[in-house]
Amino acid sequence: MTVHELDTALSQATQYLHAARRVCVLTGAGVSAESGVPTFRASDGLWEGHRIEDVASPEGWYRNPALVWQFYNARRQNVAQVRPNPGHYALAAMERRWGPNFTLVTQNVDGLHLAAGNRNVLEIHGSLRHTRCLQCAAVEDRGLEPLGDAPKCPRCQGRLRPHIVWFGEALDETIWQRAVDAASACDVLLVVGTSAVVYPAASLIPAAKRHRSIPATVIEVNLTPTEASDWADVGLYGPSGVILPQLVQRLEASRFSS
Ligand code: BV8
Ligand code: ZN
């Protein structure tokens, strides 16, 4: 994208957002890339020589739970060392502007949107900080300390698993329904840093357009075009840590010019 093309697209995006009453955001691993959190597709889907789908899956868990805990402890340690980037903070500034009419749906499990100050966050794929007990189903926030490869529930001594949605597992129904409601009611859906290949998360993008008297405007912010680009009214291609702050700056300027 040339500087001029990006400038034009940023102006268009600012106009749509300036007029929006309700905003929904869908983020993926790309929004955390500039914080140093590896994305899924870029890391050719491998971790220590294991395919991520083999480790982040029920089959992988039943085959070798200790290996799965090693994988998640390694990611907890990585995330414990990283901080939100300017893109995360820009999304927090947007929530301050729209308040309860702003919903952030994330596929990420790194907790960086909450760390940046967003509050209305739907972590549809779970969270690295949380564990779930296989016996009493208790979900606990355990911070990001390593938990060893066979941690036990502090309440009932049952076995704990990461509170993460693995491939082949259903999403939490209540959280998912809130995400669908937000995408189906928003005036603008901002899609940031996702290859839009994982479902049902990616289905939020057509949900913002279909079966609506006034379809939402879809704005994509990504390094490159993706599966979502066909749905996008505006495409902003470049690093989200650079583009999102530029968007917020223009929104601030437009607030005073209206
Ligand atoms: C379910 C937790 C059913 C794990 C994750 C065939 C076709 C369609 C679907 C399927 C299929 N076969 C199976 C399915 C379903 C499957 C699926 O979608 N598979 C895909 C791979 C085809 N989905 C599921 O299994 C879901 N469950 O369907 O259950 C069911 C229903 C009822 C009852 C029982 C069962 C569960 C999906 C959840 C899986 N868990 N995460 C963990 O994190 O440890 S998904 C995982 O992928 C992460 O959450 C990640 O966020 C997510 C999506 O990836 P992205 O976020 O998009 O990351 P990616 O690397 O792909 O892209 C990054 C993008 O950022 C790139 O475009 C890049 O250009 C860009 N970028 C990079 N840097 C920057 C940037 N952009 C801007 N700035 C930058 N600096
Ligand atoms: Zn328990």
Image (cartoon, helix red, strand yellow):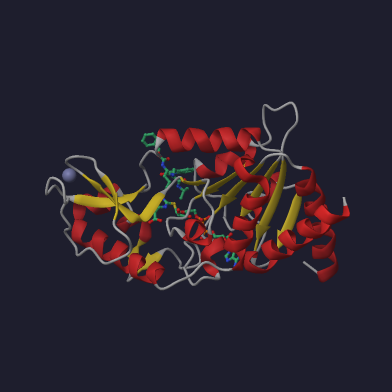
In the drawing, does residue 43 fall left or right of residue 90? left
Residue 64 visible, this angle: no
What is the x, y in percent for residue 240?
Answer: 64, 64
Number of numbered labels in the structure image: 0
User: Which residue is more in the foreground, 248 or 214?
Assistant: 248
For residue 238, which quarter of the picture? Answer: bottom right
From the top left corner, tell me how far across and down residue 109 is, in percent: 42, 55
The spot of residue 258 in percent (x, y) is: 87, 50
Q: Quadrant of residue 79?
A: bottom left
Q: Where on the picture, by quarter, is residue 9? A: bottom right
- Side of 90 relative to 14 (left or right): left
Residue drawn at (63%, 67%) of the image: 241
Tell me the residue at 36%/66% (across/down).
75
Which residue in the rendered view is the most extreme toward the right?
257
Is residue 28 toward the left or the right of residue 140 in the image?
right
**Vertical relation: 196 (above or below) 182:** below
**Taking 29 as reference, is 100 left or right?**
right
Residue 113 makes an appearance in the image: yes
Q: Is residue 133 above or below residue 254?
A: above
Viewer-nearest residue: 87 or 51: 87
Question: Which residue is situated farthest in the left direction here?
Answer: 157
Viewer-nearest residue: 132 or 68: 132
Q: Is 36 rendered above or below residue 217?
A: below
Q: Nearer the viewer, residue 85 or 212?
A: 85
Give the percent coordinates (x, y) of residue 30: 56, 62
Write the residue at 53% across / 55% down: 28
User: Quick one: quadrant of the N terminus?
Assistant: bottom right
Residue at x 49%, y 62% (from the top left corner): 41
